[in-house]
Amino acid sequence: MTIVSSVSTKASTFWRLLRSRGLGAATRHTGGYVRSLPVKPRPNPYQALRRGRLPQAIGLSTEIILDTNVYNSYLQHRHGEEVLLDVHDYQMVVNVSEPGLHTDLIAYGEREVHSSAQYRSELAAISATANRPVTVLEVGGHIGYFALMAASVLGEAADIHGFEPSPENFERLQDNIALNGFEDRFTLSRMAVADTTGEATLEIGQFSNQNYLVGEGVHAHAEETRGERIPVDQVSLDEYIREQGIAPEAVDVIRMDVQGAEYEILEGARSILGADDSLLIFMETHPNYVPVEKQRQLTSWLSEAGLQPVYSAAGFRTPDKWPDRRVEEIGDLIDTNAEVLLKR
C-alpha cells in the first residue's frame, strides 16, 4: 500500500488546457445524483485541481478522453488494488478499482465536500458542550468515511454505534477503524437497520455503496445493477438502544445514507424522534426509491419531532448553485435528492 498525497500546482493553467479541449462544460456540470437510475459520477478534474491534486486531475481528464484513468492505473500497477489515503485528519485504505467513494477519495481527498464540512462543524459544536459521551448512530457505515470523521472530531467523547450489513464492507470498516486506533470509540454490528428486528435479504449492488435490502427500493434499479442476495440480520434503532441500555434522549446524532430505506429506519426510531433533547440527523434523501406517500409521512415525523433543516447540498454543489436541491423547510425534502442536516 502507499500513501496518496496531494500536489500543489497552479490549477488555472491546466484548467485552461482542459477548456481548450472542449472539456470545460463537461467537467464543470457534474454531480452523479440523478432522479432515475444510479449512474457512475462523471470525472471532475477541475475539482481535483482546486484541491492541488495535479496527478489525480490528469487521471480524471484521461478518463474523460480515453475512458481510462491513467493515474489509478499507475497506482494499481505499482501498489496493487489497495492504497492508504490521508483523509481529513485520519487514514483509510481504499480500493483503486472500486468506483464511488473509493475513487472519489483518491481523486479529491474527500466526499460530499460541503455537507461533510457542515457535519464536522456540527459535531465539533456538540463535543464542545457535551458533559457526557456523545452517542452517534452510524447507519450504513460502509468502509468508514463518516464514522471515522465522527470519531476524529469527537475524540475521546465519541460513543459511535455503527451498522453495516455487507460482509466485505464490514471487514473494511473494522480495518479502517483499527488503522486509526479508534476501536474504543466504536460498537459495531454487522446488520441492517430497518423498522423491525429480525431477518432480511441484502442485495449486493454493482458498487459497494449500492447495497439494498430487498423490498426497499431495489426494484427501482436497472436489471444489470442487481447482484447476489445474502441473508442478514436487521434491527430497529429503538430496539437496539433498548438492548444497549441507551435512553432515547441520550442519542445525539443519527447519520445515514441508506439508498432509499430512510422511511423504514425512522419508522423504527420513533422513540428517539419523540425524545425532548437535542438531536442532529445527517441523511441523504433518495426520492426516486421512496413512494411519495412515504416521503410525506417521513416529513411529518420529522416535523412532529421538532427537527428543522439547517443545511443542504448535493456533491460539489451548494444550494445557491443548485436551487432545486435547496431544503429550507421540512416539506422541501419531498422529491428532493440532497444531503441534508436537520436539528432540534
Image: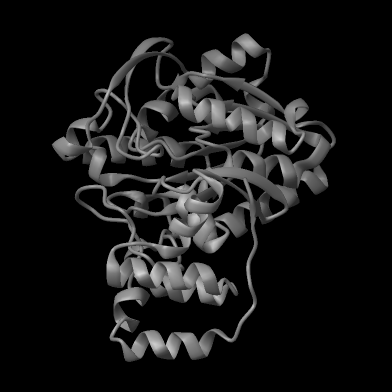
- Residue 26 in the image: above or below residue 338: below
Residue that lies at the very extreme toward the front in this rendered image: 78
Q: Residue at x 35, y 74 (%)?
A: 27
Between 93 and 127, which is closer to the camera in this rendering? 93
Q: Residue at x 47, y 27 (%)?
A: 168
Q: Position of residue 60 (x, y in %)?
A: 41, 67
Between 9 and 343, which is closer to the camera in this rendering? 9
Q: Position of residue 258 (x, y in %)?
A: 40, 36
- Residue 222 in the image: above or below residue 266: below
Q: Is residue 238 left or right of residue 70?
A: right
Q: Is residue 79 left or right of residue 251?
A: left
Q: Residue at x 53, y 34 (%)?
A: 141
Kindly indicate the quadrant of the structure image that contains residue 19: bottom left
Quarter of the picture containing the C terminus is: top right
Residue 334 in sight from this viewpoint: yes
Q: Position of residue 114 (x, y in %)?
A: 54, 62
Q: Is residue 321 left or right of residue 179?
A: left
Residue that lies at the very extreme toward the left in this rendered image: 223
Between 163 and 310, which is closer to the camera in this rendering? 163
